[in-house]
Amino acid sequence: MGKLDGKVALITGGSSGIGLSATQLFIAEGAKVVITGRNQTTLDNVAKELGAHVVVVQADAADQVSMEQAVAKTIAAFGRLDIVYANAGIASPTPLGSTELSVFEEVLQVNVTGVFFTVQAALPHLNEGASVILTGSTRATDGAPVRAAYAASKGAISSMARVFVSELSPKGIRVNTVVPGATRTTIWKKTTPEETAKLEASQARTIPLNRMGDPREIANVALFLASDESSFVQGAEITVDGGARSAPFGAPIYREG
């Protein structure tokens, strides 16, 4: 038996990276999954790969109506909704001194407002035992340059999750947050494989386990939070970053020389 047998999940931003790994894993564990994304071609490719266990919906996480439609399609396809993984997000750079207002606001719109309205759209269909999973980031606390909007948005996720816990606990709905660190996804890829390898090696030196994470490793934590194995886990933030956040001085960069 799979850990998610009989359950239905909605994963926003499920067509690539961590979201796609979670989609594949959830299906392998018995779930039916609806994923959203902006690119129809990418969504169609995922649908071909995963078949009848997945429904793809082109939707913009920042658009309230779009997410309400995605939830409606989930119910139409599978008749219920047990897991909401609000994973969609963008990470546009916003350097202080040269950032356009529209760029800054889009990051907040997708990463904060979009998450709120994703959960709100799903709420009428969530019953006792349902799981809501949010995506944070170690960028919320590490002070990375040119990431002010992204850091602020992920800090907001942590704060918003606490409010969700207070509001949804009486309904028996759990809300938890996965906090990835540096993970090998397409956003890290450079122009050439050599440049990508150089970047990964540089990142590894800042991580106590001396490597970047794999999307599957993040998805495994989401699977735990989605499953009944985490039935008494509420309001948790689980950081998956190889120790970079908890013990930065344990990184190789401080052990060398």
Image (cartoon, rainbow, N blue to C red):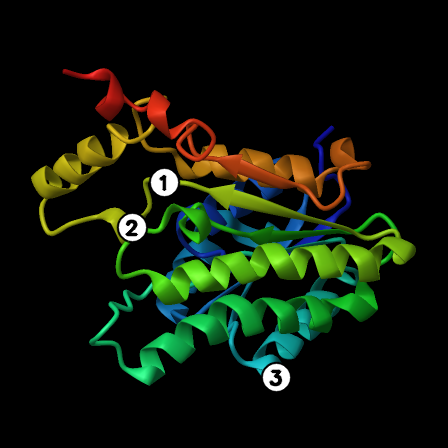
Callout 3: SS: helix
- Sequence-earlier tag: 2 or 3: 3
As drawn, is 246 to the left or to the right of 80?
left
What residue type is disc 1 on? Answer: Thr
Q: Quadrant of the N terminus?
A: top right
| Tag shown at residue 65 | 3
Q: Is residue 88 visible?
A: no
Where residue 89 appears, x then y in whole percent? 45, 62
Specify the quadrant of the image occupied by residue 183.
top left
- Quick one: label 1, few (<14), some, or many (20+) residues within 10 Å? many
Marks 2 and 1, how far apart in space?
9 Å
Where residue 200 appears, x then y in whole percent? 22, 36
Where residue 207 appears, x then y in whole percent? 33, 29
- Sequence-earlier tag: 1 or 3: 3
Q: Residue at x 40, y 50 (%)?
A: 139
Q: Which of the pair 12/102 is nearer the observer?
A: 102
Q: Which of the pair 15/190 is nearer the observer?
A: 190
Q: Which of the pair 256/10 is nearer the observer?
A: 256
What residue type is disc 2 on? Answer: Thr
Marks 1 and 3, how far apart in space?
31 Å
Marks 2 and 3, how far apart in space?
28 Å
What residue type is disc 3 on? Answer: Val
* Residue designated by label 2: 186
* Residue designated by label 1: 183
Q: Residue at x 54, y 52 (%)?
A: 135
Callout 2: SS: helix
Callout 1: SS: loop
Specify the quadrant of the image occupied by residue 232.
top right
